[in-house]
Image: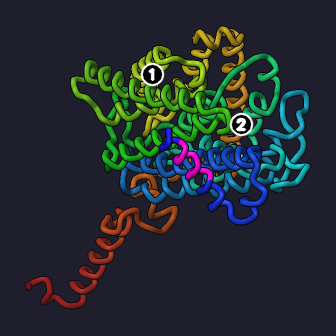
Amino acid sequence: MKRKILGVAGGVLLLLALGGPAMAQDTTIESLAYDLDVVWVGLAAALVFFMQAGFALVETGFTRAKNSANIGAKNLADMAIGGVAYWAIGGALAYGATSGGLLGTSGFFFEPGAESSVLGGDGVQFIFQLVFAATAATIVSGAVAERMNFVGYLVISLAITGFIYPIVSHWQWGGGWLSEMGYYDFAGSSIVHLTGGVAALVGAAMLGPRIGRYNADGSKNPIPGHSVPLGLIGVFVLWLGWFGFNGGSTLAANGQGAVIGHVLFTTVLAGATGGVLAFATVWITSGKPDPIMAGNGVLAGLVGITAGPDLAGSVGAFVVGAICGVVVVASTLFFERVRVDDPVGAISVHGTCGIIGTLAVGFYAAGREAGFSLGTQAIGVVAIIGFVGIVTAALFFVVDKIFGLRVSSQIELEGLDWHEHGVEGYADDIPVVARMLADRKEEADAASVGASDPSVLNA
């Protein structure tokens, strides 16, 4: 008992010390509770922010070295451009005063503390929503890797973070029409992941497969990534980030301890189960325990549980993770068969498993008790697919006409790093184009010397 008392007293003293003299004078239970909420949501936002590093590692590792700088540039752009776009218009469309339940119409150019700002002017809450928007855009990056024009990608990223994702999130989290129907998505299986997955599918389909991916008879050729360990480190970073993605979606710490603990437990269990079942499925079907597919199985399980980590019990989390672990393998093979070239499996992980996770809410006992039905969940899924699919298809079409969606075959073969950015992903990785130019110069110099000095030919 004495240790517990000393521990509580020490914790209070620590909070007072961290808060400074003003806090020591005016501390109340309410202010401590608010500070705890800010710290928790801020930490969760930081974890989700760090998921951008996870996406960069996964996409870079599972693709070729000659495009690694390009992939990093796209991930960086998602956060940078997304941050500005969401501040200027995205946050208002998502959380502003509703217009018929379709989109927000107030709170543009967010200002912390201002009464007219969305989310009560709470800066940390706004940041938490902002990093979700950037995540939705980043999902597209992997599916269009190694062949998309960088300028065109910037336009797509801007549109997703500033317009498409905010409107979808308003439907549910901003008090829009899906919320009014009784639709439920705790942390974004559909709002974030399905949105990104559908946009990824549209982009990959309209771009077409990478050069050499398929033969004339329809058979496929593997294009292995340059660093499986790098990609798997990215999976671990994303898994870590999901503690903030799902856990932080309580949007508070005060009075939420039991919920946060439950959410973190089901999140970890679903991810682990997804990895186990993906390992088993690909082992049975191909004869080898492919670590890349297992990594995607982990991510698939995490996506699947994200809609209802607070509603699923341990069995529910296990079942959803297991289903997603099997389905992500089948979905990946399906898209390969129909010649939709997705280098990292983003469509299957985020799109297909986002649907599974969202529909699963209607099967959880706690979900049914709360009045969440399979029918309502299905309506939301169809609406998101329809809206995102139509808008992104139109957007990709316009971008193609103005900027061109795809780089030239020469650039694709020689690598986007050198042509699009003028840098090398790795210092000791001499770009193909540079080597070719050097070879041509040497040949020209030799020919010139040989023509003017016949003795060279006899050397």
Contact? badges 1 and 2 (CB < 8 Å): no
Residue at the (45%, 31%) spot, across then down: 268
Which label's residue is closer to the chain start, 1 or 2? Answer: 1
Is residue 410 visible in the rendered image? The answer is: yes
Q: Residue at x 50, y 53 (%)?
A: 408
Of discs 1 and 2, which sits in the foreground?
1
- Secondary structure at badge 2 equals helix
* Residue 249 lies in quadrant: top right
**Closer to the camera, 77 or 265?**
265
Q: Which residue is mark 2?
A: 394
Characterize the local packing of mark 1: few (<14), some (14-19) or many (20 or more) Cα atoms within 10 angstroms.
many
Q: Is residue 304 magenta?
A: no
The percent coordinates of residue 175 (x first, y second) are 82, 29
When the figure is inspected, residue 185 is found, relative to residue 453, above or below; the finding is: above
**For this view, does 413 lie left or right of residue 360?**
left
Residue 444: numbered disc: none
The amino acid type found where label 1 is placed reads: Gly
Tell me the amino acid under the disc marked 2: Ala
